[in-house]
């Protein structure tokens, strides 16, 4: 028996293809789902319509992570509990994976076997270093080093070979020739980090209906103290904070057809929303598949996301990304001459299986916390404002997951992530001007909202969006533009009470 339970022979039997037109999906493209019986289809159809009654909570709305929802009291550990419906053996695997997720890696050579291989260049020494308490990263405070925020780097294609690699999606971006795909401020002893960066802020004042005013802060990034010479003059830079880890396995369990049904890349229905799919290559098969993880939906699976983080953030090689020097480029000869942590007796790479399997399993099974105050009158009013303002056009409230999900704990669950997992043009103010795969420099994947109201409880801050520029939930809404501009304007024009109700609803998620 493998680490994660496999599909039984019975589930491999021939299945009926059913056209499903979810009421919640409006006039999106209808696609086939091969995982449901007719009875399943009818059950799903009954619960997937958008809410029209805001006098009371919907059935099962409190259990936003399905049967795996954590019912524990909110605390700093609210994002660190396992799915409630795991088996006893899976609970054990989860706990071992948790230990590896928190593990501090050391530079090579180290006296502790199987714990060396850090870097040589890196952003953090552990997964937990970026995803503190399995939650959301933030920009550094004045005087602090940036750990849970880092800079992605790339350049426009320079020749036909690079253009062809992007066209065929063998690469999603072209790394900066000297500094690679990620700017890494830290290095092991005896080596220089790649440099530092500073953040300055420009105030933007927005007048709100009712005589209120909001002041947004636009971040401006300046790289300094480069350790390996000048960057390419056309270098594209994109800051990213670490996203929360909850519910990832359930997002992976959403049937691709349910996401495809929401896509409308040419805005055929004329509603101003043109979400599009991100197509990426599966690192295991090499085939094109749906990307759904990361700020630009550039990873198809949690394992792929995990391997990328090990390599780029910590500089640890895995069976999926076996380069022991992480993001060190060929131009960084001093970096690539440092010792690495691969040990022949433990197998290839610095984090061989089962390390990758265990960390992946842990990442797939962090529970979504139970909703709070779902029957509170102000929360219900805020939910109505959320719907009426047009937020559900991208923040799709709910799904029924696939019957064919790899882990039985994730199968056929009604979940409430509030995302369509599609790419949307968010306008010039949020643009990073750095394309990645199918995502243009103005497009971002709709982030899930579940758990967002517990950010301050878990992480002791309220910084949101891809670079943490928003200092609270209202600011996060006010930064929306592009396809979300009308929804943003609707919020600006709300009465102060209705805006407060909207925030109360978001805080209940």
Image (cartoon, helix red, strand yellow):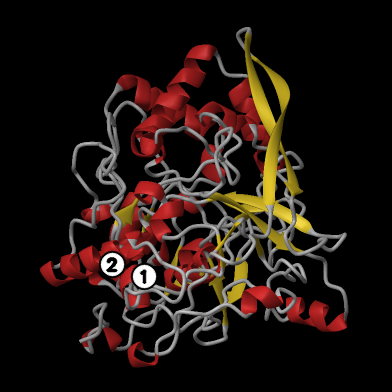
Q: Residue 228: horizontal and vertical position, in percent? A: 75, 64
Residue 166: assigned label = none
Residue 162 as seen in the image, left or right of residue 190: right
Q: Quadrant of the C terminus?
A: top left
Give the residue at mark 1.
360
Give the residue at mark 2.
97
Q: Residue at x 28, y 43 (%)?
A: 78
Closest to the observer, 9 or 158: 158
Q: Residue 383: horizontal and vertical position, in percent? A: 42, 30
**Mark 1 crowdedness (10 Å alpha carbons): few <14, some 14-19, many ≥20:** many
Identify the element where label 1 is drawn: helix
Looking at the image, is mark 1 or mark 2 nearer the viewer? 2
Q: CA distance from mark 1 to mark 2?
A: 8 Å
Q: How many marks?
A: 2
**Farthest-out residue, front:** 190
Residue 329 appears in the figure: no
Q: Residue 6: horizontal and vertical position, in percent? A: 26, 82
Q: Residue at x 41, y 60 (%)?
A: 126
**Mark 2 crowdedness (10 Å alpha carbons): few <14, some 14-19, many ≥20:** many
Identify the element where label 2 is drawn: helix
- The image quadrant that residue 508 belongs to is top left
Quick check: 423 above or below 58? below
Residue 445 as seen in the image, left or right of residue 130: right
Closest to the observer, 26 or 183: 183
């Amino acid at each position: 028996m493998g680490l994660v339970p496999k599909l039984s022979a019975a589930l491999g039997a021939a299945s009926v293809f059913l056209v499903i037109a979810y009421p919640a999906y409006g006039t999106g493209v209808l696609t086939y789902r091969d995982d449901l019986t007719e009875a399943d289809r009818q059950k799903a159809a009954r619960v997937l319509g958008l809410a029209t009654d805001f006098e009371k909570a919907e059935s099962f709305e409190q259990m936003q992570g399905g049967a795996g929802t954590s019912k524990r009291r909110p605390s700093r550990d609210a994002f660190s509990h396992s799915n409630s419906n795991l088996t006893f053996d899976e609970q054990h695997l989860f706990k071992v994976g948790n230990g590896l997720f928190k593990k501090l890696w050391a530079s090579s050579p180290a006296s502790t076997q199987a714990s060396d291989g850090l870097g040589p260049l890196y952003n953090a020494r552990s997964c937990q270093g970026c995803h503190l308490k399995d939650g959301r990263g933030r920009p550094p405070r004045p005087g602090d080093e940036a750990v849970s925020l880092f800079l992605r780097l790339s350049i426009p294609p320079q020749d036909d070979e690079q253009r062809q690699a992007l066209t065929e999606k063998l690469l999603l971006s072209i790394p900066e020739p000297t500094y690679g795909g990620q700017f890494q401020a830290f290095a092991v002893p005896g080596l220089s980090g790649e440099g530092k960066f500073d953040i300055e802020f420009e105030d933007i004042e927005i007048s709100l209906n009712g005589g209120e005013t909001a002041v947004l802060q636009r971040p401006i990034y300046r790289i300094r103290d480069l350790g390996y010479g000048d960057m390419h003059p056309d270098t594209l830079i994109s800051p990213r904070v670490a996203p929360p880890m909850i519910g990832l396995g359930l997002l992976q369990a959403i049937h691709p057809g349910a996401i495809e049904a929401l896509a409308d890349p040419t805005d055929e229905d004329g509603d101003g929303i043109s979400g599009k799919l991100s197509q990426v290559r599966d690192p295991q098969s090499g085939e094109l598949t749906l990307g759904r993880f990361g700020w630009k939906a550039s990873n198809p699976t949690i394992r792929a996301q995990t391997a990328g983080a090990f390599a780029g953030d910590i500089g640890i090689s895995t069976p999926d990304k076996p380069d022991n020097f992480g993001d060190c480029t060929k131009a960084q000869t001093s970096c690539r001459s440092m010792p690495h942590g691969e040990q022949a007796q433990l197998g290839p790479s610095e984090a061989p299986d089962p390390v990758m399997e265990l960390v992946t399993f842990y990442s797939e099974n962090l529970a979504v916390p139970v909703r709070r105050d779902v029957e509170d009158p102000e929360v219900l009013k805020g939910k109505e404002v959320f719907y009426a303002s047009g937020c559900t056009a991208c923040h799709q409230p709910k799904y029924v997951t696939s019957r064919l999900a790899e882990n039985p704990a994730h199968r056929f669950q009604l979940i409430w992530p509030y995302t369509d997992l599609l790419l949307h043009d968010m306008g010039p103010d949020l643009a990073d001007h750095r394309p990645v795969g199918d995502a243009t420099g103005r497009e971002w994947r709709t982030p899930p909202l579940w758990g967002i109201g517990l950010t301050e409880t878990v992480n002791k801050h309220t910084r949101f969006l891809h670079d943490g520029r928003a200092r609270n939930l209202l600011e996060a809404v006010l930064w929306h533009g592009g396809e979300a501009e009308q929804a943003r304007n609707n919020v600006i024009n709300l009465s102060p009470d209705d805006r407060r109700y909207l925030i109360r609803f978001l805080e209940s998620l």
